[in-house]
């Protein structure tokens, strides 16, 4: 797996850890196996106050968006990593799920899922592609239909791409979206890149070949400039982005010096 793809093991380890809790916000029974020892080592190496909580909140937030978007039966996980929503969520009948990620990750994931006897709860297509290239060709070839509204989930990706590539991706998602399509995901704040509290973690990610590259304190602008109509942007701790897991008050927008993550939902 290339440097950034290994971060999928980290977030899988986070889901495995969440699954073990009595008050788990979701359960992902395959996450531990998919994460493997490397995933758990990274989970420890990148641990920071707020990070573990945020990863659990992010997954639950997006699970809830998916639950609320049941009318959208064409779903694309953009940079799916080792996500097992195809197994762990109850999907409306007729749902077709597409998973995009680097080919080496997809190959390894498919092999492990087969070994683990994973049973998918919807029709599923895993596609190896580079999201900074012409990825919609392989998506169409797998059966994705641009005339049908799509639910796009972009979880834990945008800040690993150079900002220009991330903006190009967001704009391409918008331009490919039939009316009624929804995009949900997360963005990192610029403060997260410059805060004294994140520098050690950022250094470790750089050392491991998977640096966070950019953030924005104006997520609404980034989405709007890419052609999306913002429905909501939430920070952890706010209603609908806490789930009892965020022990601090939500940081007021515009606070400087502290890291902040954004969860968003937008429509085409
Ligand atoms: C932190 S993981 C998140 C994975 C998953 N969405 C999750 O939340 O567990 C980041 C993912 O982005 C993928 N990724 C990063 N850059 C990519 C690119 N240019 N093309 C395809 N996938 C990419 C990596 O392979 C990795 O699976």
Image (cartoon, helix red, strand yellow):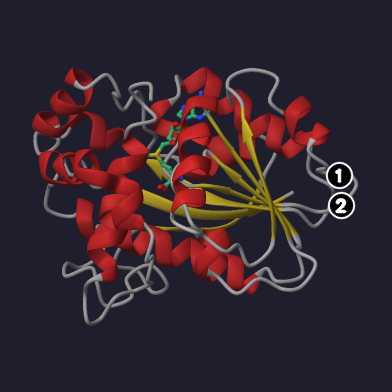
Disc number for residue 145: 1
Q: Is residue 132 left or right of residue 203?
A: right
- Res 46 quadrant in image: top left
Q: Is residue 254 visible?
A: no
Q: Is 169 placed left or right of 260 in the picture?
A: right
Residue with the mark numbered 2: 148
- Residue 42 pos. (x, y %): 18, 39
> Height in image: 131 above or below 257?
above
Question: Looking at the image, do the residues carrying marks 2 and 1 touch, with CB atoms under 8 Å apart?
Answer: yes
Residue at disc 1, secondary structure: loop
Depth check: give the residue in front, 20 or 176.
Answer: 20
Q: Is residue 94 visible?
A: yes
In this rendering, position of residue 262 left or right of residue 180 = left
User: Quarter for ligand 1?
Assistant: top left
Residue at the location (50% across, 54% down)?
264
| Residue, far right | 147
């Amino acid at each position: 797996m290339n440097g950034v793809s290994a971060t999928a093991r980290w977030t899988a380890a986070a889901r495995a850890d969440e699954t073990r809790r009595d008050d788990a916000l979701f359960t992902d029974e395959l996450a531990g196996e998919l994460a493997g020892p490397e995933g758990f080592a990274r989970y420890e190496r990148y641990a920071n106050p707020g990070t573990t909580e945020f990863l659990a909140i992010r997954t639950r937030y997006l699970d809830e968006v998916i639950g609320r978007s049941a009318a959208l039966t064409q779903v694309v996980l953009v940079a799916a990593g080792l996500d097992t929503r195809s197994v762990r969520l109850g999907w409306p009948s007729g749902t077709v799920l597409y998973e995009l990620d680097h080919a080496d990750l997809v190959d390894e994931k498919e092999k492990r899922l087969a070994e683990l006897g994973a049973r998918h709860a919807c029709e599923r297509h895993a596609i190896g592609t580079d999201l900074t290239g012409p990825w919609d060709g392989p998506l169409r070839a797998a059966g994705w239909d641009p005339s049908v509204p799509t639910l796009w989930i972009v979880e834990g990706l945008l800040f690993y791409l150079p900002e220009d590539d991330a903006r190009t991706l967001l704009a391409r998602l918008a331009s490919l979206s039939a009316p009624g399509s929804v995009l949900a995901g997360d963005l990192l704040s610029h403060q997260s890149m410059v805060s004294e509290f994140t520098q050690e973690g950022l250094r470790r990610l750089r050392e491991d070949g998977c640096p966070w590259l950019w953030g924005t304190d104006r997520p609404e602008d980034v989405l709007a400039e890419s052609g999306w109509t913002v429905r909501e942007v939430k920070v952890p701790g706010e209603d609908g982005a806490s789930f009892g897991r965020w022990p601090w008050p939500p940081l007021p927008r515009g606070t400087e010096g502290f890291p902040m993550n954004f969860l968003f939902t937008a429509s085409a």
